[in-house]
């Protein structure tokens, strides 16, 4: 049996302002820190788990607040999509720009953010890392601190038959999923903690 805990990082000021934020290395907001500190006592006991972070300030801070003192590995493959020229801008700021209109029209999976990457490129690097991680040995206990896009990519990879879109799989900041893999069987539960955002 392999168990994977997926955690989306805590709240940031950029998330509070509904800005596109991928490659920009921002910390948690004061509210994000406060919410995670309230959530800390509700977290599952992950003694013996291998911890991974995307290596961004927001994921590292989240991991260190919720599981202080644990060793963890930073993996750039787990980073959020690179939004290129749309980084740290809101929908209202971008909606009338032709580059943004081109990006959101047509196939959202394949359209590349100018100066950034596509959803498919992000998914490919995230899933390549997950496959490599799972190939190392049969039974694992893994905890991953990452971002909204990678969480969705991983859930869609393990549970394709559910045909859920990005918004159906997306979880709030500080929330996540528990995945159990046993041979060809896979199941999950959503982790909704009181105090999540």
Image (cartoon, rainbow, N blue to C red):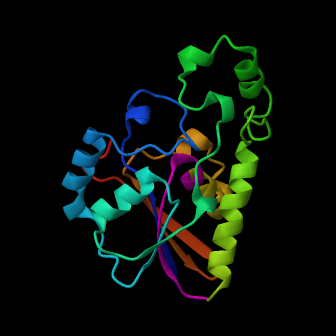
Residue 46 magenta-drawn?
A: no
Q: Is residue 39 left or right of residue 64?
A: left
Q: Nearer the viewer, residue 105 or 191?
A: 105
Using the image, determine if residue 34 lies above or below residue 71: above
Q: Nearer the viewer, residue 192 or 123?
A: 123
Task: Answer yes or no: is residue 8 visible.
Answer: no
Using the image, determine if residue 153 lies above or below residue 14: below
Q: Is residue 192 left or right of residue 59?
A: left
Using the image, determine if residue 164 lies above or below residue 145: above
- Give the quadrant of residue 5: bottom left
Residue 143 magenta-drawn?
A: yes
Q: Residue at x 57, y 65 (%)?
A: 75
Q: Residue at x 28, y 60 (%)?
A: 65
Q: Residue at x 80, y 28 (%)?
A: 106
Q: Nearer the viewer, residue 187 or 72?
A: 72
Tell me which segment is drawn in magenta.
138-151
State the image coordinates of residue 29 (x, y, percent, origin top left): 32, 40
State the image coordinates of residue 43 (x, y, percent, origin top left): 28, 65
Q: Is residue 12 left or right of residue 44?
A: right
State the image coordinates of residue 170 (x, y, percent, origin top left): 51, 45
């Amino acid at each position: 049996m392999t168990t994977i805990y997926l955690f989306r990082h805590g709240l940031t000021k950029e998330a509070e302002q509904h800005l596109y934020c991928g490659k920009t290395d921002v910390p948690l907001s004061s509210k994000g820190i406060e919410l995670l500190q309230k959530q800390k006592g509700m977290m599952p006991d992950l003694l013996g788990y291998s911890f991974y972070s995307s290596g961004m300030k927001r994921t590292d801070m989240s991991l260190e607040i919720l599981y202080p003192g644990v060793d963890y590995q930073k993996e750039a493959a787990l980073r959020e999509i690179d939004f290129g020229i749309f980084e740290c801008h809101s929908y209202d700021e971008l909606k009338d720009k032709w580059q943004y209109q081109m990006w959101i029209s047509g196939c959202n999976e394949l359209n590349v953010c100018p100066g950034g990457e596509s959803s498919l490129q992000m998914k490919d690097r995230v899933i390549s890392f997950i496959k490599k991680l799972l190939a190392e040995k049969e039974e694992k206990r893994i905890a991953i601190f990452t971002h909204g896009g990678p969480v969705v990519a991983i859930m869609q990879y393990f549970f394709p038959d559910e045909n859920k879109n990005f918004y159906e799989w997306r979880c709030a900041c500080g929330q996540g999923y528990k995945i159990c893999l046993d041979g060809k069987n896979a199941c999950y539960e959503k982790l909704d903690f009181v105090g999540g955002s």
